[in-house]
Image (cartoon, helix red, strand yellow):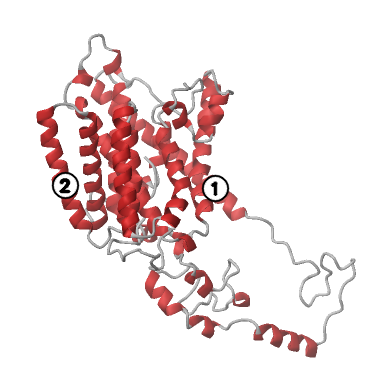
Amino acid sequence: MTDATRRGTRNDTVQALKLLFLLVICYGHLFAEGPAATLPGSTLMDGLPMRLWWVPGDVGLFFFTATSGYFTALRYPGAAMMQGYWRRKVSRLCGLFLFLNAVLGCVFLATGREGVFTWDALVNLLGLNGFLNWFHLGNDSPFGAGQWFFTLLLLFYLVYPVMNRAVTTPARGRLLLWGCVALAAVMQVRLPYGHSLWSTSVGFVAGFWLARFGGSHPARSGWFALCACLAGAVAYRFIGHLPVLAYSVIGLAGYVCTVLALTVRLPLLPARVLDAVGDLMLPLYIIHTYFRLPLAQDPYLDALLVLTMNAGIAWVLLKAYALLAGRRRHAGPPTVAPRGAGMAGSGVPGPGTGGRAKPVASPALAAKAHHAANAETPSPQALATHEPAVQAASGLTPAGQTASGQTASGQTPSGQTPSGQTLSAQALSGQTYSGQTHSGRSSPGRQSSPLPARTKGEGTP
């Protein structure tokens, strides 16, 4: 996908906010593990700004989950539109995740780290590090540092098909949203963790609700959340530290950021920067706590330099994975001729013919066979009758085809696209170029959403 195409199919505000929030989170982790934590009697973590550094970080975690739930609900808006869901999710996340952990495994072996070949390592390689944290099972392997969020993301992807099938009316959507908010508040009191697990979990449901039922009045819900957030912040100032209230304010602030990013396009970062970094979020999130070197005596400068170094390493690993995946994709499986089919018109036997070459047909018989084959193949003119509406709705034309449904060479091989399906059937299935938008159909009980549908914002911190 070219830079121009990528810019046309993504929300730059969402991408910029995700990158900025991730940098805030990683900087806080690196600062806490740097000289500020080793200096005797250091109070840097207790003073400003680091004492409140966790607030924008937790707001960013809610933003990550809310945008993930939002874009997932947009791309798969109904039970009938779930074709290819697991294939896309697995190929998008798991391939890069395993590649990064393979690189880390080589680093661990080269540096003599212990616990590489343990059961805990297997759990972490499956992306289930969160369960080791949540059930206080410990982790004897070097893998999985701070990767509870990835486990939470996998759990949402696992539950989404059930939500998509069951929550089909606004009443059910409100019940799901407020039920999850109440459950998160109770769990924050009864079962608190050292990270914002419960408020972050609500973000998935909030994004799902916003895409499915809140699209008609997104600004109204955003203003309501902003007023509630300010009121909660004032109450927190007078009441004192109350975790439930604190995480409520954080969740409301994350929701406001989500609505703002989805409805208002703000040039937070230049498009060239976003094109250069690409999908840097997952590699940087996975590796940023492993490559830690003392680069400066000043704790603030040290954390900044280490973060820059990790961003460079993550970018190199991302490019290496893209190169590896590109080679595998271009290589592809070998083309196998159908059983009994040889080279047309050549008399070369195909598999299953007993090694005997079939006689070459006479010109008259070949003409009849060609006429019969063409009679069953939809013509480009017939295909073109379905395409204007589809292309008008999607705004995209599949690569290598003109608006008439023909290939760049002006011919349509056997009346089919390279995938083996006619263009009209492929477009009417509800998926467009790269599967990142939908055809505009509404599932039962789903209101039309004025929020931008042709966006790209799914991902992980």
**Residue depicted at x 25% and y 63%:** 216
Task: Name above or below for residue 371 compared with residue 159.
Answer: below
Q: What percent of the width, then of the height, locates residue 285?
A: 39, 35
Quadrant for the C terminus, please. Answer: top left
- Viewer can see residue 11: no
Amino acid identity at mark 2: Leu
**Residue depicted at x 54% and y 20%:** 115
Q: What percent of the width, then of the height, locates residue 136?
A: 44, 23
Q: Residue furthest bottom?
A: 364
Res 325 label: 1
Quadrant for the N terminus, please. Answer: bottom left
Check disc 2 and report its element: helix, strand or loop. helix
**Residue depicted at x 46% and y 30%:** 131
Q: What percent of the width, then of the height, locates residue 89?
A: 49, 49
Q: Earlier in the sequence, mark 2 or mark 1?
A: 2
**Residue depicted at x 48% and y 46%:** 158
Res 226 label: 2
Residue 11 in the figure: left or right of residue 1: left
